[in-house]
Image: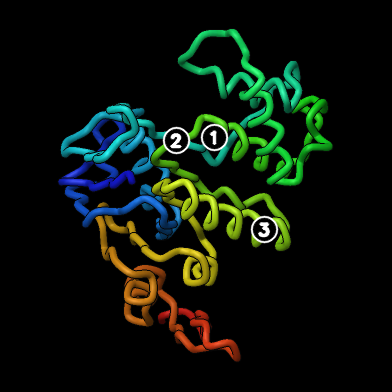
Amino acid sequence: MVALRLEGVGARYGRTQVFNGISTDVLRGGELTAVIGPNAAGKSTLFKRIAGLLSGPGVVHVEADRDGHRSICYMPQDTGANAVLTVYESVLLAAKQGSGWRVADRELTEIDRILSALHISDLAFRDLGALSGGQRQLVAIAQALVRKPEVLLMDEPTSALDLFRQIEVLEFMRKLAAADGMAVLIALHDLNHALRYCTQTMVIAGGGLIASGPTEDVITPDMLREVYNVIARIECCSEGKPVVIVDGTVG
């Protein structure tokens, strides 16, 4: 099973330091880790740094890789749309990245399985450019999953989805991570989703890592006041699940 660990990781754009010195305990496969923090805190930059799309100090450790191959897949927030390709073609293209162009029956079967699991089989032969933002987001998830990554970095994958689809995708990803042993990091703004679906949480703010650990230990009233400038409580609902209740802003 894969394990991810960050050691003194930093990143910058030009002369602007986005963050520095981010170190974590081991993030193990089979779990969802929420990456939270204010807008422009550096969550997307962190994902790009982990994926090797940006350089910077520190080391990204990926251990127990399949066949010695480090498979990290980054799903950006803005997936764009190529109107020339159909949904099926775009997912097939993602599956063939880094390999030959001969297509095996098992690969087509896997694409069909993923599209079905995300309930977008009916979109298979629609042009990407004709899809809604939420539909394109689901296609982007399919493109990521068909590559069978060991580490999957999902940048706000539910931002364009309605409430039903948000829950559906998070439930699906939690089950898939457990079944396949993937380490899944998800940038989220909905802290209640983090509490409900993610076993671990990292808080990025002020150019560094503010907190990291079990979600219920990290999302606290003190952290919400410090990082988000809100006065909030963590209370249990009728099912005993923790819920963030915001009473107002600081000051």
For label 3, the residue is: 168
Describe the element under mark 2 as helix, strand or loop.
loop
Describe the element under mark 3 as helix, strand or loop.
helix
For label 2, the residue is: 149
Front residue of this view, candidates 52 and 205: 52
Front residue of this view, candidates 180 and 211: 180
Residue 134's spot in the image, x, y percent?
71, 45
Going 68% across and 24% down the picture, which residue do you hit?
A: 108
Residue 236's spot in the image, x, y percent?
51, 88
Front residue of this view, candidates 26 and 209: 26
For label 1, the residue is: 144
Residue 74 numbered mark, or none: none
Describe the element under mark 1 as helix, strand or loop.
helix
Q: Amino acid at mark 1?
A: Ala
Going 60% across and 91% down the picture, which residue do you hit?
A: 238
Give the tally of numbered discs.
Answer: 3
Q: Amino acid at mark 2?
A: Pro
